[in-house]
Image: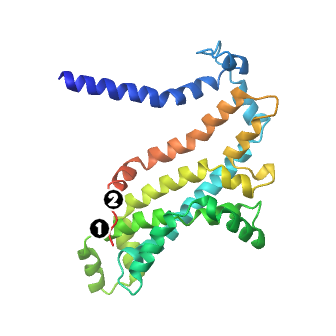
Amino acid sequence: MKKSKLLTLIVFIFLLIYIFPLLWMIISSFKTSLEILTQKLLPSKLDFENYSYIFKQSGVLRWFLNSSFISLISTFGVVIITTLAAYPLGRLKFRGNKFLFYLTLAGIMIPLQAIMIPRYLLLRDLGLLNKYWGLIIPYMVNPMNILIVAQFFKGIPNEFEEAARIDGASDLYILFRVMVPLARPALAAISVFSFVGIWNDFLWPLIVMTDQKMYTLPVGLATFYGSYTMKYGVTMAGNVIASLPIFIFFMIFQEQLIKGLTVGGLKE
């Protein structure tokens, strides 16, 4: 019993350490810049001036809509492309299957910084700089997502596929009517990971978008950092707003995400 209470206490302490920055951010969004600089624990009054500035004077709403559009469309594209790529990799037997598997695995080892310049030059030649599709298209393909879903497909019993083939089902029918419903946990997992990663990405939107109206929320919030001034309270309020969609998205797919994380290790 004592050991159990001690473990509970340790978990509770780690929980407080984890959520303290989040609570501090929410509380600070109601403070003035002076109260934040003086490290006052609680605001003197519940002031919504920071949120009022965001909704009335800054471009946060436009940046929020940009991030929402880019993240949702990109995540939808991730699910479609990952599904189409993972099914033959995980279920079909053909010459070169192992080569494609290892090639996809090698794609995980290439850092974004190594391909950033070629990708930028390609988008420039296609005329996609400072356009939504310049962000959306590169986000749609992720080798890690393909491997996760391919491994999930491998773990599905063959009886489902064999029964469908006996009924004369095609590969596309089996994919979308049999495999996809069974792979919902894995697809939900990559959807959450992709949405969060795209929503929080700062570097790539900073490079592609040059017009302030086209900024995503992380890039837009960085404009509050001036050379001599800093809108601390407004920045905290913006961060609170930026965190809400991630929290909502996670809550919607929480159960499926946990199931998706039980996918086994890589198999050849």
> Is residue 266 rendered to the left or right of residue 213?
left
User: Is 63 located above or below residue 140 in the figure?
Assistant: above
Instruction: Tell me what residue is drawn at x 67 percent, y 55 percent.
Output: 204
Q: Percent position (x, y) of residue 3?
A: 21, 25
User: Is 137 located above or below residue 53 in the figure?
Assistant: below
Q: Percent position (x, y) of residue 247?
A: 51, 41
> Is residue 123 rendered to the left or right of residue 199?
right
Q: Which residue is mark 2?
A: 263
Instruction: Count residues near mark 2 (Cα–Cα under 10 Å), then give few for <14, some for 14-19, many for 20+.
Output: some
Q: CA distance from mark 1 to mark 2?
A: 8 Å
Q: Amino acid at mark 2?
A: Val
Q: Which residue is mark 1?
A: 155
Instruction: Tell me what residue is drawn at x 30 percent, y 80 percent.
Output: 164
Q: Percent position (x, y) of residue 80?
A: 51, 69
Instruction: Count residues near mark 1 (Cα–Cα under 10 Å), then give few for <14, some for 14-19, many for 20+.
Output: some
Instruction: Tell me what residue is drawn at x 70 percent, y 27 percent.
Output: 232
Quadrant position of residue 265: bottom left
Q: Percent position (x, y) of residue 215?
A: 74, 50
Assess whether mark 2 and mark 1 are in contact (beta carbons under 8 angstroms): yes
